[in-house]
Every structure is written in structure tokens, then in C-alpha cells.
Amino acid sequence: MFNVNPIFAEPEANENLSNVGDDDILRQRFSQFQEQKLVEKFCRETHLLKIVEGTVASFIEDYRRIRTPEKLLTPLLLRLDFIYADLLTHAPSLLPLIVEEPLQFGLAVKYSVYGLVRDQLKVAGLKPIDIGQLHAQWRVVGLPYSPNLLFDPAANSLRLGLSLVQGILSAYTPTETLVLQSTWYCGSGCMRNALQTSATDAPLCPNCSRPMSEYQKLRVTETYRLLAILPSSCVQTPRSVDRIHRPTIVRLRAYAYTCDLKLGAKYLITGHFSGSTNYSFEACHLKSA
Ligand SMILES: [Zn+2]
């Protein structure tokens, strides 16, 4: 939980490197800043800027129409497709980051998009929103099949970067609900708000310590399924004996796919390892293979 409207610290571009003692921390911060700049440049050169601008424009329009303070707490949901061919053309230097450090790339996307959102709100004369209101759902689309990128528990190869799972859909769970954001206010007149980005338990007011009440209409959810993906080899040699084929359990959120899920069909899934106890792979894109 965090309070709404904190001051958002951003690394400065012209920071003097020699003035800071801890070189490692600084180098890391500096490179994170460069990553964010690369993502921002990519957004500006592709269709992604239009998506961000359109979403912020409707946020502003909604606020101007209704003008209630809670309208400024509504979430901004953005689905951003990073097309592999566009990355090759506009930002080849981003590819190593995406492939080796997908979670860090996800953060760079969130922070750079937040910068774009904040700029547009400023132009409209509005205060910045909380970064927790921004849900930048990124997908890497069109990553070509490559054996080096395979995530293959059967071969004891669990890649940690962006990876591919290719195989047969052998089972999936019914859809389950994931809470992306719940928004809270203090009913005791404290004028305090809070956001939660995963839990739905009432937080305690930071001022009077009473449980807060939820703006039910502002809750944003998404569905997901868990998929069991068997390696294609177990279907190609169905008569092999003395062998257990263990599926990879993949979590597939609704934003990550648009095609139908058919049992027995073959899919290529882009995503990354997840340390969850329920599943081992988090998908960020699924397509028929
Ligand atoms: Zn209170």
C-alpha cells in the first residue's frame, strides 16, 4: 500500500558522476536512466506514443466532464506491444535488455511511460497521478523461435531472461481474477486516499488508523488462466514407455493473448521464469505455432 501523490524521484540526466562515492549504485542508476530514455525514444518513434496520448486524453476528458476528486484516482490501463521488427529498426540496443533482463525492461517501460503521462497531464494543468495508477502491460510480439531461448524444464534448462515455451496445450484452469488496483478513502473525514496494487483487504488510514473504505467502481481486475504445456516431443513419440512427460505450468494473463485456446493445439509462448509456487512461467505473449 502507498499513499497517493508521493514525490516521484527521477534520476537527473546531468548528474555529475565524480561527485558520488558509490560508483556501482550510480552506474546502475545511470544505466536505468539510459534504459528509460531508450524506451521513451522508441515510444515516440512508433505507434506507442499515440496509445499513451489517447489514454491520457480520455482520462483528462473524463475528469473534466465529472470533476470529482476520485476521478483523478482512476487507473490508466495501457497495452503496449513492442513489435520485434520495430525494435530491430528503431532500438536494436534495447534488445539485449529485453532478452536478458525482461523484468528490468518492464520497469523501464513503466517509468518512461509515466514520464510521458506526467508531461501530458502537466500541459493540461493537472497534477501528476500516482505511479501505482499506471498499468503498463507490455508484450514482446514476434520474437522469432530460437533454440537458445527455450525454457525447457524437461531438459533441466530454466532460462532466467526472456524465454520461449513451445508445446501442446494439455490442460487449462477456469479463469481466475487478479486485482490490478483497488482505491481507498478514509470514511472518518481525514481526506486520505490509498491505492493497493494486489491485495483487496482494507488498508488502515495512515492518519487515524481506522480501516479505509473502497471506491468499488475504481477497482480494476484482469483474468488469467494457468496452462499446462507439454513438450511437442511427447506427442511426436506417443508410444515411448518408461517416461513421464511433465508439463510447464504457465500463467497467461488476459492481455497476453488474443487467439482461442484449444486443447491439443500447439502454441509458442514468450515470457519469463516465475518463482511462484503455482506456476513456473509468466507469459507475456501467446500465439498459435
Ligand atoms: Zn483517517
Image (spheres, rainbow, N blue to C red):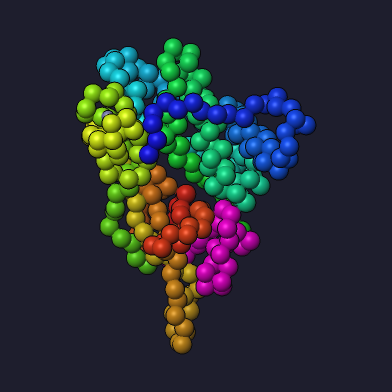
| In the rendered image, the vertical position of residue 42 relative to residue 162, given as above or below | above
Q: Position of residue 130 (x, y in %)?
A: 42, 29
Q: What span is colored magenta in the figure?
A: 147-168
Q: In this view, which residue lies farthest toward the right?
A: 18
| In the rendered image, the vertical position of residue 112 relative to residue 266, given as above or below | above
Left or right relative to 119: residue 27? right
Left or right relative to 40: residue 259? left
Q: Position of residue 48 (x, y in %)?
A: 51, 31
Quadrant hosting ligand 1: top left
Of 46 and 135, the residue lying toward us: 135
| In the rendered image, the vertical position of residue 264 relative to residue 106, given as above or below | below
Identity of the residue drawn at 34% across and 55% down: 225
Identity of the residue drawn at 48% across and 79% down: 237
Left or right relative to 30: residue 9? left
Q: Is residue 287 visible?
A: no
Identity of the residue drawn at 54% across and 47% down: 103
Q: Position of residue 18 (x, y in %)?
A: 78, 31
Q: Is residue 25 magenta?
A: no
Left or right relative to 95: residue 177? left
Q: Is residue 4 visible?
A: yes
Q: Is residue 164 magenta?
A: yes
Q: Position of residue 119 (x, y in %)?
A: 51, 19
Total numbered badges shown on the rendered structure: 0
Identity of the residue drawn at 61% across and 62% down: 147
The quarter of the rendered structure image containing the N terminus is top left
